[in-house]
Structure formats: structure tokens, C-alpha cells
Image (cartoon, grey):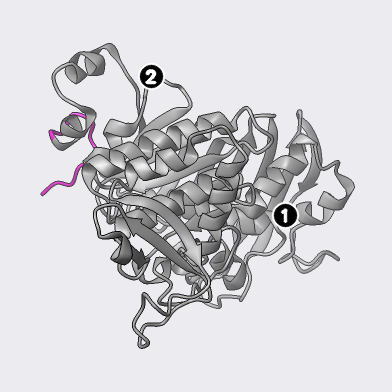
Amino acid sequence: MIRHLKIVGFKSIHELDLELGVLNCFIGANGVGKSNILEAIGVLGAAANGAVDDEALLRRGVRPGVPRLYKSSFRNTRTAPHISIEAVSEADATYRVSLLNPLDSPQPAWTYKTEFLSADGEPIVSAGVRNSRTNLNPQAGLAALRMVELEPASAAARLMTDLQQFALYCPNTPTLRGMQADPQSREPVGLAGGGLPAAVEALNRLARTTDEPLVDDLLALIDWAAEVTTARSGETLLSPSVARTQEVLKFTDRYMNPSRSELTAYDASEGALYVLFCAALCRLERSPKVFAIDNLDQALNPRLVKGLVERLGRWLLGSLNSNTPRQLLFTAHNPGVLDGLDLTNNEIRLFAVDRNSAGHTSVRRVEMSPELVGLQQQYPLSRLWMMGNLGAVPNV
């Protein structure tokens, strides 16, 4: 789990330090740099895996870009020629890297300028400036090679694994419906939402082996459905002209005549698909331990997203007591998200993202100060955000 994150010189981020919880929500106007924070972790994950090139970035949900767009370039601020990103785990392991790529002659892979991995204050990898005069490949990470020498349960190995497996998800409705292939397949779901039927089947299996009310939680959010299952073929429920996967989701509408109450993801509410997608990532064992969702609130009614975020908090906090603790970072624009956040719990954190007068992305944690507690007795957090009390609103 990442407890501290530092980013320098990446896109709209001049310099940023963040202390993270288990559930982390980033709000703000469009274009302030919320997604850049999530993508920076993806770049660090690629570096931890040994190479920062387009393929490695795409695999983690990061938009590839030319160096002149990745490196900060503010009009009135001098910035370093490299990108620097650092993550510190709760067990005090640190991984830090600085990356270079010439603006005028971009290379397919970024060069490691420096790389550092430590645990309990003891360096494991401490590579200074690397260049073509050394015997080392400057485009290959050293920490990834040292992983084979580390105990899997060690703090350094756990941090590196969390970074290597990190993914930034951005689901879209056609992929969730099974109408188009996911360009980045993963387990339990692809970065765009592919493979949802198999993930739902895994959720149903999990529900049968646990005392937790997982199915009840999901059906409370998808209140029109009596049941959500999967089927090997949707021939009787789908038009022959509709593209489909081998396995399809099958919903039972509680309000319809039993003989005609079944429908697939193609005809179901897209909000239900996004709910199932989030549940799969939070609850299934094969999900990354650290992951991000961009625009988690898309296609969701304000009251539905409030209920979903409440359950995300409960699921993730519950994971702390298991062998697979998870951490989620997500961006949102729907004010209803805020009403699902229990900010009295220190592991649930809300960050207001803006751009300052120089254009730098700035982030401020919204905490339950006495003033905010007093205001919340009159208005919910969603209303306070809309009224401008929390910042992170556009100047329109």
C-alpha cells in the first residue's frame, strides 16, 4: 500500500506531495490534473517493472505521450529536465526514480537517470546518474532485477509488486456490455471493463463461500434486479446482429413477467454494469492491491453513486484485515460521491485539486475541521462543494 507519493515535473504537476489513505477521492474542475496524479503512479509502476515504454504504459492504463507533453513546461517556472516520482509504503519501503527522454529526438523507452529502492532506511538499489559510458543499459531498471533476491514477504518486495501490478481503469459502456473487445485485458476485468461476465461469476462464487452480504449489497444498489448471473449464450436474448462474448451477463428484472424477465448486459442499465465492475475490483482476489479508476461516477445517478461509494469504503476497510488489503484512488465529478465518504475515518480521504496562478496542479486534503463540521450540520458535503466551500470548482 502506498502511504506517501511524491511527483515532480510530470505534465501539469510541478511538485506534489500526498499522504494517502485506503480510499482516496480526487475532485476538481476539468483539466486541473486529477488524472495526471493517477497516471504518474502508472509511470512509476512501469519503471518498477523494468522499462518505461509505450507498451508498459498502455498495459497500466496510462496514455502514452511524447516527452514534450510528459515533462512539465510552465511559462514562468523553471523545471528540471527529468520526471521524478517516489512512493513510500506503510512498511517504510521506498522506491524512487527519475526518468529522461530527449525532447528533440524522443526514444522508444525512457532512460533511468537515477533509481533508488530501500527498506527500513537500508538501500537495496542506489543507482546514481547512468549514461552510455557505463556497462548498464540506461533504459532498463535495476530494482526489477533485484526482485529475485528479495523475500516475497519483505517490505521492499511488497511495494515493488504493488507498483508493478498497479492499473488505472477507465471503463466504457460498449466494453462493459460485451459489444467491443477490451484493448487491455487483465484479471479480473480489463482496463476498459472487458471480461465482466467472468468477474460476476467469480463474485457469485465468492458470495457462496462467505458470510458477508455481498449479493445483498449489490442487489440493493441494482434495485430493479432480482438476480445477476451469467450464461454461455445469449441467443434467445440478443439479436443475431449484436456482437457478443462467449459468456454473457444475465439480469432478472423483478418487475417483469417471469417468462420474459431476463435480459443481458446489452439491454441492462449501464449504471448496473459500472456497479458490478467496481465490486469486482474491490472484492476479487486477483485484483491489483493498488489500483485507480478514472471518472468512477460516470453513468451513475447521484444517490446510486453515494451508495456505491459507501460500500467501496466498507469493502476496502474490510480488506485491511485480510491477506489482500487493497487501496483505491479515483477521480469524480458527481457531487453525490462526497456524501458517500465517511471523512471521520482517517483511511477515507478527499482531495480537492486545483491549478494555482502559475498553472501548477495543487492538491489539498479536505478534513473534517470544526468549521466544516458546523457547515455540514446545515448542508451535505455535495452541496458545500457546489457552493464553493471546498474549493476545486471551475471559474465559470
Residue at 54%, 39% in the rendered image: 327
Percent position (x, y) of residue 349?
41, 30
Residue 235 visible from this viewpoint: yes
Q: Residue furthest bottom?
A: 241
Q: Main secondary structure of the magenta part?
A: loop
Percent position (x, y) of residue 238?
36, 78
Residue 319 image-quadrant placement: top right
Percent position (x, y) of residue 33?
36, 51
Q: Which residues are magenta?
A: 387-396
Q: With respect to residue 27, does 58 lie above or below? A: below
The kind of residue on which mark 2 rests is: Thr
Residue 164 magenta-highlighted: no
Indicate left or right for 220 with 113 as reference: left
The numbered dot on residue 344 is: 2
The numbered dot on residue 164 is: none
- Kindly report the distance in space between the C-alpha atoms of the residues bearing marks 2 and 1: 44 Å
Mark 1, Cα crowd under 10 Å, few <14 / some 14-19 / many 20+, is few
- Out of 220 and 142, give the one closest to the viewer: 220
Residue 393 magenta-highlighted: yes
Secondary structure of residue under mark 2: loop
> Quick one: quadrant of the N terminus?
top right
The numbered dot on residue 129 is: 1
Percent position (x, y) of residue 301?
23, 48
- Out of 251 and 244, give the one closest to the viewer: 251
Q: With respect to residue 132, does 329 lie above or below? A: above
Residue at 38%, 55% in the rendered image: 274
Q: Which badge, 2 or 1, is on the more N-terminal residue?
A: 1
